[in-house]
Amino acid sequence: MSQSPKSSIKEKPPLIWLNIFIFTSSLALALIAAPWYAFNYGFGGEHFVWLLICFSFCSLSITAGYHRLWSHKAYQAHWSLRFIFAIGGAFALQNSILHWSSDHRVHHKHVDNNDKDPYSAKRGFWFSHIGWMIRDYHGDAYDNYSNCRDLQKDKIVLWQHKYYGALALLMNVGFPILLGIIHGDVIGMFLMIGAVRLVLNHHTTFFINSLAHIWGTQPYTDKNTARDSATLAFFTFGEGYHNYHHIFENDYRNGIEWWHYDPTKWLIKSCSWLGLTGQLRKAPQLKIEKAKAAMSLRNAQKAIETWPNKQDINTKLQHEFEVLMSSMNDYYELKKQLLESKKDDMVKKYEYSVLTLRYKDIKKNLAQQTSAWNYMLMSVTKKARAH
């Protein structure tokens, strides 16, 4: 018997009722019960102090632990720090390390592919923010976590995965109640630490999957929807520099400049001074600069697309770009030689002096070329606005 048109249409995956219950109940408690309780009974300073502590602990366990440590192997961590992150991850209630990392690695491998990216931004804000967790879209992908073989060698990861349910209940129910007993306000602490904190942790993380692919700039690449946003970085402990992250995913930093707000980077670096982290990975500066310059060239080429003399201007842009790339290569190659010569005790002083002089000359040349390149880009931008 032939199928009817309706039955031939692909059916939606089944709803995940546990997730729906967690999201809706926590949101209702945070938006309705907590304000009602505050109006009638009030919250004390201890409620807000513990909210800040627990929110920060959970967020950093996700950003420094689940994300940069386990998903991207951006650095190595002592077992004690991994254990703390594992507990904080269960407290954040975002599934186990193994499950979270598996999803995230698929996201990076197939970013914006609606059929393969588990939370593709091209399927809309709602889907990438929370919709992908409402239905069992990729249930068959979690049979053996084959893309996380390395994590399956970590005993703490396996322990947390095995006992994730118990740990999640202990941290999200037991710990708020314990704080309530200590401070003499079980209901108030449960609402603030159990519900309000959980909603904040969930949606600030979810914003990276959704809003960070919609709102912001693309200074490094336009090959995917990821954006950089200093505002999002503030609310997500540094994760808002998402455009950079999607091209240099194994860098332990997301905000690479010293002024970039990235507490996750600061935590990882600080822990390295205590011997708790090591092998911190950084993208080569030459690759970073090349990516920025290439993106600037593409933006300039788009800006002059409708200009009558676009061919001449494009030729000049391309020439300046190639000269800039040559200057960058010379500068970073000589810088590498200079650093290596410092380590060589046998190198003669005059050879080092010669390298130093050459380095200063090339550095000056790169600065001049960069200035010329930026001036040309600025001129194109001004003319584009005038058009």
Image: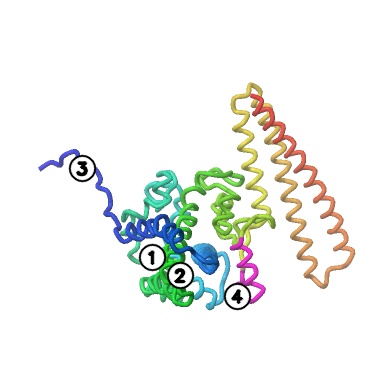
Q: Which amino acid, mark 2?
A: Leu
Q: Is residue 38 above or below residue 152?
A: above
Point out the frontmost of discs 4 and 2. Answer: 4
Which comes sooner in the sequence, label 1 or label 3? 3
Which comes sooner in the sequence, label 4 or label 1? 1
Residue 274 belongs to magenta span: yes
Residues at badges 1 and 2 in contact (C-beta under 8 Å)?
A: yes
Residue interval drawn in magenta? 263-279
Q: Which residue is mark 1?
A: 145
SS at circle 4: loop
In the image as oriented, which residue stretches furthest toward the right?
A: 350
Q: Which amino acid, mark 3?
A: Ser
Please state if 344 lies on the left or on the right of 111 as rendered.
Answer: right
Residues at badges 4 and 2 in contact (C-beta under 8 Å)?
A: no
Residues at badges 4 and 1 in contact (C-beta under 8 Å)?
A: no
Please state if 265 lies on the left or on the right of 3 as rendered.
Answer: right
Point out the frontmost of discs 4 and 1. Answer: 4
SS at circle 2: helix
Residue 130 belongs to magenta span: no
Figure quadrant of residue 93 = bottom left
